Image (tube, rainbow, N blue to C red):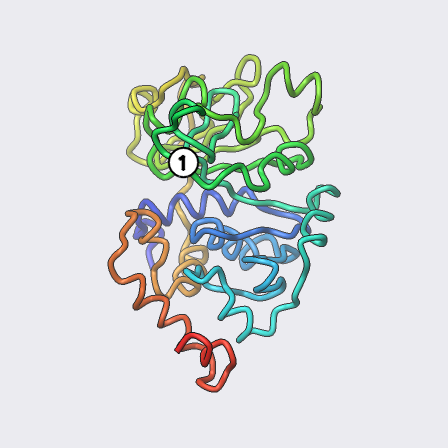
Amino acid sequence: MNAVDYTPDELIIVAMARELGGEYLVSAVTPFGQLAAVVAKHTHAPDLELLATPESGAGSDPWPSISLGQFQGLSQGAVPITMEDVFDAIFRDRFRIWINPAQIDRHGNVNITAIGPWERPKVALVGSRGIPEDSSHLSQMLFYILQHSPRTVVERVDFRSGAGWGPDRERHLGLAGAPTRLVTNLGVFDFDGPDHSLRLRSLHPGVTTAAVQEASGCPVVIPPDPPITPPPTPAELAVLRAHDPLELRRWEWASEVDGLRRRWQEERAHLPLDHPEVRRWR
């Protein structure tokens, strides 16, 4: 396998994986987040523990899953944990998660709640969920956006689901929970610019600095001669592809909906036919 034979989605996942390390419980609720955690665990971070949902359990080695891993967790004998365990890990800074926000601004405030004015939003999203806790307690906050555009990387988010840098953090939260990294389809970014503003760390191969600024709805600090994001290695690609046999990463990448029922049925096929969960859904 040649290291240059990769797709843009695989480059993003590997760039995400390289940000993970240490002994943490990693929540993996999206195909990209899950594959990043799996690649990290099998290449350079063996002490990571993966979690799809508390119901699916921790300590398994799951595929990306439409069913959030319930079928696979059952088939792999994962260790069940409770929401109390998850929040305990968050409050002790032993938890990591890759979050895919609808919007992120130049100081790392993120929005997964609503697009448009709160009183009459154009789009209602999933709500803030666990991001307020994450952005108050974790020393590493990780975000990814698959379509870097002025609609997703903005000057100011429409609703603040998670706190970035700024006066409110300095007054109420301190340094814990502040955003540390953003990976998009154009490059890898941090928040180490002036006043903790968005800064380019590396460009993905073939992307220009002009393209980054044009695709951003806010100023981005761009250093002279930024490095190029290293391509995936053969070992990283082998792990990634082996752990996504249904190629759900491509569904998340392209928002493709056709075939989801077939893939869901394929997930069930990996349990014995007499398993209670299979009988329940037949």
Residue at the (61%, 47%) spot, across then down = 21
- Quadrant of the rendering where the C terminus is positioned: bottom left
Q: In this view, does 229 lie above or below 197?
A: below
Q: Nearer the viewer, residue 86 or 158?
A: 158
Residue 58 at what x, y percent from top left?
A: 62, 62
Q: In this view, does 61 lie above or below 253?
A: below
Left or right: residue 80 compared with residue 66: right
Residue beneath disc 1: 124
Three-letter residue code for mark 1:
Ala
**Extreme residue toward the front, this view:** 119
Residue at the (64%, 52%) spot, across then down = 25
Left or right: residue 8 compared with residue 138: left
Q: Could you tell me how many numbered marks the image carries?
A: 1
Q: Which of 245 and 85 is in front in this view?
A: 85
Left or right: residue 115 compared with residue 197: left
Residue 7 at what x, y percent from top left?
A: 30, 49
Q: In which quarter of the image is residue 261?
A: bottom left
- Quadrant of the rendering where the N terminus is positioned: bottom left
**Extreme residue toward the bottom, this view:** 274
Mark 1 residue crowding within 10 angstroms, few (<14) / some (14–19) / many (20+): few
Q: Which of 12 and 67 is in front in this view?
A: 67
Left or right: residue 282 compared with residue 181: left
Residue at the (59%, 21%) spot, across then down = 165
